Image (tube, rainbow, N blue to C red):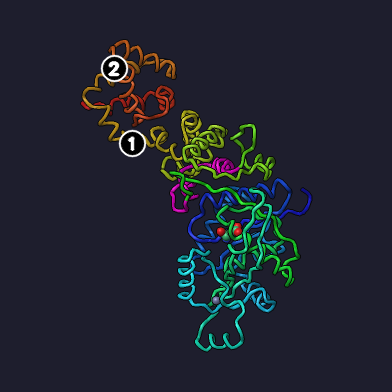
Amino acid sequence: MSENIRVRFCPSPTGNPHVGMIRTALFNWAFARHTGGTFVFRIEDTDSARDSQESYDALLASLRWLGLDWDEGPEVGGDYGPYRQSERMDIYADVANKLHESGHAYYCYCSPEELENAREAAKAESRTPGYAGTCRDLSEEEIAAFVAQGREPVLRFRMPDRDFTWDDLVRGDITFAAEHVPDYVLVRANGEPLYTLVNPVDDAMMRITHVLRGEDLLSSTPRQLALYEALAAIGVSDGTTPRFGHLPYVMGEGNKKLSKRDPESSLHMYRENGYLPEALLNYLALLGWSMGNDVEFFDKEAMAAAFTLERVNPNPARFDLKKCTALNGDWIRALSLESLIARLTPLLHEAGLVDEVPTAAQMALLEAGVPLIQERMETLNQAEAMLSFLLVDPQNFVVDADDSAAVLGPAADGVLAAASAALQNLEPWTTESIQEALRAALIEGLGIKPKLAFGPVRVAVTGRRVSPPLFESMEILGRDESLSRLQTARST
Ligand code: GLU
Ligand code: ZN
């Protein structure tokens, strides 16, 4: 595609960023990158009651964390700014006026109660419950009477009395019959412009060519197509209308639409629980798009290189946290040791286990210990529990209370004593020699099963029943510390 493709990601800064929103951002980003187009980031903050600065900051921070860079938008600028709608209010007021003057919109004086009654009546008669066009053609006198009553009008768009059809980039031909698209409100009685106005106005003025967004917005498309025609007529748009593509729903548990309130929706949850941004993007890419040839592991650059709209699937996608987490494990395993250590360091520092910049001794422990856990981690956060036995200051080492109660105690003392004796003078101190010595002393010597033999040793040395491989761990920990822990763990 050689034309100048311009797409946009235009969230409202309310609440916390959620995965559905990020999936939309990712698909737009990939489409822009694939086509050499422009990715516009616009903030739809015209609802002062719901929008917040925290949410705005969180949006920017999230895109940065994910590495989804924008070509125009907040903090970047561009030729079509400002990119925060709260800074464009004059534009909307001007366009609203022009739409009114040109007759594309009209003032509606119906009170909320009147509208509600009309809705009820329509329902009772099983007619489509939309605005019936009551105020479409009010006379001067009728208007004067409403004004005298102190009524404050909303501005309504006059929908043309015909069907609207478009060739959806994801779903093919879609038609909305005229009777299903009633006249709708553009500006509230208090003068606040609504999404219905500001979103298409900005898409037009920012020369957006492709609108890729969630299926939940499908019903606003015929309204926007009609508004586009009006915007062209009054000279706000250059007459081109963007193509629309509606991305499939994302379903959560129990085949219900994933809701912003579901915990697995929250982007922060992933960041806080040790998911890699690469893995999350990889997973979100699979929600409605496929690379083909069963390739399911790829980074966002590979996605961008392969991204075409033909491969977007209109059927609902299923969000599966287990699969997302397993993919995160794959991503962790694919990291170089150096890079994994770099990502774990801030978490381990926060847990008080290493310095902000690890000392040489800490680095040596990380380089020895991290390979032991890389194979078994699914999230970065698991490292703290798995590595603390190794990194903690020996005086602060404690055995997990539950694990101690389950495995240690008088019955285990014999095992711990035999293990100590076998390791006392062991030469050399290697994974293999430790394993051999303990096997000989415990399994053969005491005649007990591996689980009963190594369980107490593991809890004594690593503090937990679930740990990195035992003999490797002991090699890294060293003889003195291992023996000291075996001693401390004895109940007598
Ligand atoms: N601000 C709108 C939303 O977050 C944008 C919808 C659209 O992409 O048109 O739902
Ligand atoms: Zn009305």
Amino acid type at image mark 1: Gln
Query: Does residue 378 sit above or below 416 in this rendering?
Result: below
Numbered label attached to residue 418 = 2
Determine if residue 85 is in view.
yes
**Label 2, ligand 1: CB separation under 8 Å:** no
Q: Is residue 258 left or right of residue 245?
A: left
Query: Dot 2, crowdedness within 10 Å: few (<14), some or many (≥20)?
Result: some
Query: Which residue was labeled with disc 1?
Result: 395
Residue name at image x 25 percent, y 31 percent: 405
Farthest top residue in view: 444
Magenta stretch in the rendered image: 259-288
Residue 185 lies within the magenta run = no
Q: Residue at x 59, y 71 (%)?
A: 186
Looking at the image, is 311 positioned above or below residue 443? below
- On-image quarter of the C terminus: top left
> Is residue 276 one of those drawn in magenta?
yes
Q: Is residue 74 visible?
A: no
Q: In terms of secondary structure, what is the magenta stretch mainly?
A: helix
Query: Toward which corner of the image does residue 426 lie, by quadrant?
Result: top left
User: Regarding mark 2 in the picture, which secondary structure is present there?
Assistant: helix
Residue 482 locus on image (x, y percent): 36, 25
**Would you place residue 468 above or below residue 393 in this image?**
above
Q: Nearer the viewer, residue 211 or 324?
A: 211
Q: Residues within 10 Å of mark 1 (few under 14, many from 20)?
A: few
Residue 484, percent from left and from top? 32, 27
